[in-house]
């Protein structure tokens, strides 16, 4: 049965730039419908230049109950939250926001938990492993935090933006100490490769590392939700690695996001 869209419909919106690649509007709407909610998730293409004005306008729409935040707005969106979960407050980034019963906007950052859960669901073991994280943006920050919380022995971070790389390493080091380092271009000595960059999103042939450096004992995770497997995932699968795609990550975190959206205090 299709959701009834009328004056009683509750609205959620996902904000990003670009937005055409996201599959979550249909999937989250289906999850809301499965929970007997007359609600819909609407995709909105919002540039960084317009983000502040758009969010301020959306927050005064009374039948809009929550926002899903995607690239590149996760840090900026945190500034629009009156309250946040511990992990979101630590990272100062959110990927989901809800209006509480009191009217205050609350945020959470569950990208990292989705990444970790997807690997665990594939049979990967994280405790005691050495992890190589590519990308220190919103998703990368959340994934680094979640991997350390899950018990990796070491997290090494690489980003093309050296300042962003150092900022994330410093932030995580304040919580997790010398388990956090910065690293050069090669993943050879690590047990886990986590791609949190957009490499492969528009061109699946674009690989963030030399795929010949992968080993069969590695765990490889990719945040990219491209159509078809990226070069990184194909290379990992071809040599027997445990691997997880951006779609696997999204499936793992979708219900966590919906739980948060519907659980206002």
Image (cartoon, rainbow, N blue to C red):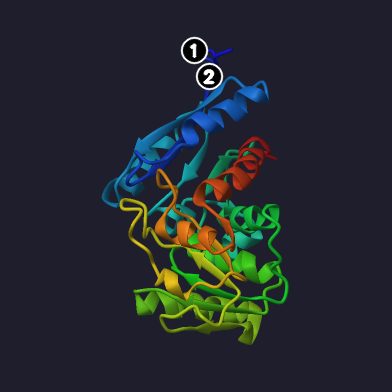
The residue where tag 1 is placed is 6
Q: Position of residue 119 (x, y in %)?
A: 64, 57
Foreground pick, 213 / 83: 213
Give the distance between the C-alpha atoms of the residues marked 1 and 2, in whole angstroms.
Answer: 6 Å
Q: Quadrant of the N terminus?
A: top right
261 relative to 209 in the view: left or right: right
Give the vertical position of 81 relative to 241 (above or below).
Answer: above
Q: Quadrant of the C terminus?
A: top right
Q: Secondary structure at mark 2?
A: loop
Give the vertical position of 61 relative to 160 (above or below).
Answer: above
Q: Position of residue 10 (x, y in %)?
A: 54, 24
Residue placed at 45% from the left, 30% from the top? 61
Q: Residues within 10 Å of mark 1 (few under 14, many from 20)?
A: few
186 relative to 161 in the view: left or right: right
Q: Position of residue 131 (x, y in %)?
A: 58, 74
The residue where tag 2 is placed is 9
Q: Check contact, mark 1 vs mark 2: CB within 8 A.
A: yes
202 relative to 134 in the view: left or right: left
In the picture as drawn, the residue positioned furthest to the left comes out as: 49
In the picture as drawn, the residue positioned furthest to the bottom comes out as: 178
- Please indicate, yes or no, whether residue 92 appears anywhere in the rendered image: no
Q: Position of residue 36 (x, y in %)?
A: 67, 20
- Please indicate, yes or no, whether residue 78 appears anywhere in the rendered image: yes
Q: Secondary structure at mark 1?
A: loop
């Amino acid at each position: 049965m299709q959701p009834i869209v009328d004056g009683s419909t509750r609205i959620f919106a996902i904000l990003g730039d670009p937005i055409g690649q996201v599959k979550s509007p249909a999937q989250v709407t289906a999850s809301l419908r499965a929970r007997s909610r007359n609600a819909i998730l609407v995709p909105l293409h919002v540039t960084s230049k317009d983000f502040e004005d758009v969010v301020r306008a959306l927050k005064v729409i009374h039948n809009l109950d929550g926002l899903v935040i995607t690239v590149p707005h996760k840090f900026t969106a945190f500034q629009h939250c009156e309250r946040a979960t511990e992990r979101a407050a630590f990272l100062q980034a959110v990927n989901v926001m809800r209006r509480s019963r009191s009217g205050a906007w609350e945020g959470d950052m569950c990208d990292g938990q989705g990444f970790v859960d997807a690997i665990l669901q594939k049979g990967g073991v994280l405790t005691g492993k050495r992890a190589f994280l590519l990308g220190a943006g919103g998703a990368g920050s959340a994934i680094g935090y979640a991997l350390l919380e899950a018990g990796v022995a070491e997290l090494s971070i690489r980003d093309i933006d050296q300042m962003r790389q150092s900022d994330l390493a410093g932030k995580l080091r304040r919580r997790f100490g010398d388990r956090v380092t910065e690293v050069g271009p090669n993943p050879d000595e690590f047990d886990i490769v986590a791609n949190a960059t957009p490499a492969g999103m528009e061109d699946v042939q674009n690989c963030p590392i030399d795929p010949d450096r992968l080993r069969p004992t590695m765990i490889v995770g990719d945040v990219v939700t491209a159509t078809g497997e990226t070069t990184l995932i194909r290379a990992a699968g071809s040599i027997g690695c445990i691997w997880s795609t951006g779609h696997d990550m999204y499936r793992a975190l979708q219900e966590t996001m919906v739980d948060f959206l519907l659980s206002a205090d």
